[in-house]
Image (tube, rainbow, N blue to C red):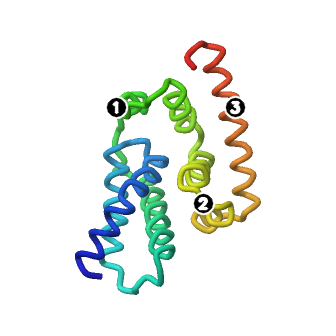
Amino acid sequence: MDEAQFEDIAKRYRDRLFAIAFQYTKSAADADDMAQIALIKCYHAEKPFENEQHIRNWLIRVTVNECKRYLVSPWRRYTAPIEDYAETLGFETPEQSSLFLAVMALPQKYRVPIHLYYYEEYSVREVAQILGLRESAVQTRLLRARQKLKQTLEGFRDEGTL
């Protein structure tokens, strides 16, 4: 892969990889590191990629694996509360901010499938392949995540924060 190809790939996928990594790490700095590691591995990949979808899926899989490795690492550092980061994102409406906080409050096993399915627009089959799960497991996680989000958002509405 030459530098021009790599720069094009990095521009197209950096934000997407960051968003996925952020679902795992809940830290902007750590998510940026995970996305950067995935892109570096892409640059040094020995096998050529078959097509655009292959590159995208490969990068996401590497990002997920790096995040999992990071989360069990003894070097994991203290990170700032997610609410501090949410304030810097500048959501247009309070509803968007509340939804972001509700999604980030989900357990990781629900948060990541929700992100891949709704924000990255992957099918259930593709999410299952990326996460190494059966399709039925992904469907169950999406269902449970939606139920938890509904409860959380109703709680926000009852408190008057939505």
- Which residue does the numbered mark 1 point to in the structure image? 88
| Residue at the disc numbered 2 | 122
Q: Secondary structure at mark 1?
A: helix
Q: Which residue is mark 3?
A: 150
> Which amino acid, by three-letter code, is at mark 2?
Tyr
> Which dot, 3 or 2, sits closer to the camera?
2
Expressed as whole percent of the image width and height from the top left, the position of residue 24 reads 48, 49
Q: Nearer the viewer, residue 116 or 51?
A: 51
How many angstroms separate mark 3 from mark 2 (CA)?
22 Å
- Residue 99 falls in which quadrant of the image? top right
Disc 1 crowd rating (10 Å Cα; few below 14, some 14-19, many 20+) is few
Which residue corresponds to the image point at 37% horizontal and 50% vertical from the top-left? 31
Which quadrant, please, contains the N terminus?
Answer: bottom left
Is disc 2 placed on a helix, strand or loop? loop
CA–CA distance between discs 3 and 1?
25 Å
Mark before the other along the chain sequence, 3 or 1: 1
Q: In the image, residue 113 lies at what x, y percent?
A: 61, 52
Identity, as a three-letter code, of the amino acid under mark 3: Lys
Tell me what residue is drawn at x 23 percent, y 76 percent. Answer: 3
Q: Secondary structure at mark 3?
A: helix
Residue type indicated by callout 1: Thr
Residue at 30% over, 78% down: 44
- Which is nearer the N-term, disc 3 or disc 2? 2
Residue 71 place in picture, x, y as percent:
45, 51
Are dots 3 and 1 in contact, CB under 8 Å? no
